[in-house]
Image (cartoon, rainbow, N blue to C red):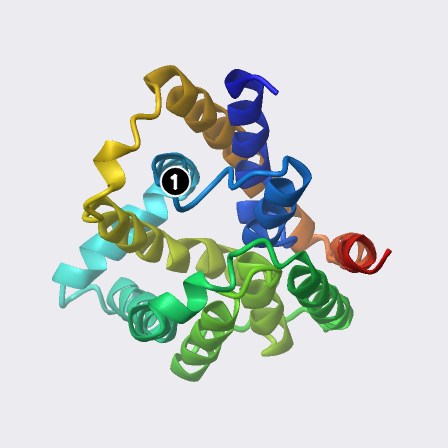
Amino acid sequence: MSAFIEAIILGIIQGLTEFLPVSSSGHLELANAIMDKKALGGENMQMTVVLHFATALSTLVIFRKDVLEILKGLFDSKDRTHQMFSLKIILSMMPAAVIGVLFDEQLEQLFTGNTLFVGFMLIITGILLYFADKAQSTGKSVSWKDAFLIGIAQAIAILPGISRSGATISTSVLLKVDRAKAARFSFLMVVPLIFGKMAKDLMDPTFFDQGQSLSYLGTGFIAAFLTGLLACNWMIKLVKQSKLIYFAIYCLIVGLLAIAMNIL
């Protein structure tokens, strides 16, 4: 497979699965196994950072007004509504940030091509999406308690195969948060964590020694960014329309196939 096609495939996978509730980490682990190589992470950390930057940027583009309001709320004590929302975003980040810092090495060991583990986690994601799809829609906003519980769901979703957007949106909906608000909160809460993880990777002494070509990295970036824009908008509409059941079925099927790959 040429590097150009590989970059496009990885970009599309990252762009779609970062926003759709099917686990980007799980799908990239499966892609690594199918392509019989470590396409991301480790020796290809540069592409990992580029793809995450692309999806983070697509989130900022779509939610640019919300991001500006969050930043304004942090420094404007008179704007209580946006300030409270900003602080809830920060609270929701804490569990994943703490887990990421304290158990970084242990978590890295899970990303070693263990497609059997990914399969079981995808099935758990599918079950969670099924119950979320059946939950009643309300007009409730995210409370402090909700923000913390959603943050715990995001921390659990560090595991490959557990969808971050699926876990956070499903948890929000099961807590009876309005579906549109749940999707908005889910996508906004991950952006600071992505940039934090990128900063950590950039400080790795081996990062700039990997020598990936600009054309390879650029192709992956464009594919992930454009796909991310489409997937983010699509996911918001699907959550509003209560159509998570389709992703639940998809995760169950892919999870079973991943398990079968290891058994047969």
Q: How many numbered circles does the render carry?
A: 1
Where on the picture, by quarter, is residue 166?
Answer: bottom right
User: Residue 188 placed where, x, y %?
Assistant: 40, 55
Given residues 93 and 77, the one toward you in this image is 93
User: Residue 67 placed where, x, y %?
Assistant: 31, 49
Q: Is residue 139 visible?
A: no
- Image-based side of 133 in relation to 160, left or right: right
Q: Residue at x 39, y 46 (%)?
A: 42
Task: Please tell me how crowded label 1 is: few (under 14), some (14-19), or many (20+) other residues with Cα within 10 Å.
Answer: some
Where on the picture, by quarter, is residue 123?
Answer: bottom right
Given residues 63 and 230, the one toward you in this image is 230
- Image-based side of 237 in relation to 106, left or right: right
Given residues 135 and 203, the one toward you in this image is 203
* Image quadrant in which the C terminus is located: bottom right
Q: From this view, report whether residue 6 is shown above or below residue 82.
A: above
Q: From this view, report whether residue 90 is shown above or below residue 33.
A: below
Given residues 244 and 200, the one toward you in this image is 200
Which amino acid type is marked by label 1?
A: Glu
Q: From this view, report whether residue 7 is shown above or below residue 193.
A: above
User: Residue 226 placed where, x, y %?
Assistant: 50, 27
Q: Residue at x 37, y 71 (%)?
A: 92
User: Residue 145 placed where, x, y %?
Assistant: 43, 84
Label 1: state its secondary structure: loop
- Image-based side of 31 in relation to 38, left or right: right
Q: Which residue is mark 1?
A: 43
* Residue at the outermost bottom position: 145
Q: Residue at x 34, y 36 (%)?
A: 46
* Image quadrant in which the N terminus is located: top right
Q: From this view, report whether residue 236 is shown above or below residue 81.
A: above
Q: Residue at x 34, y 41 (%)?
A: 64
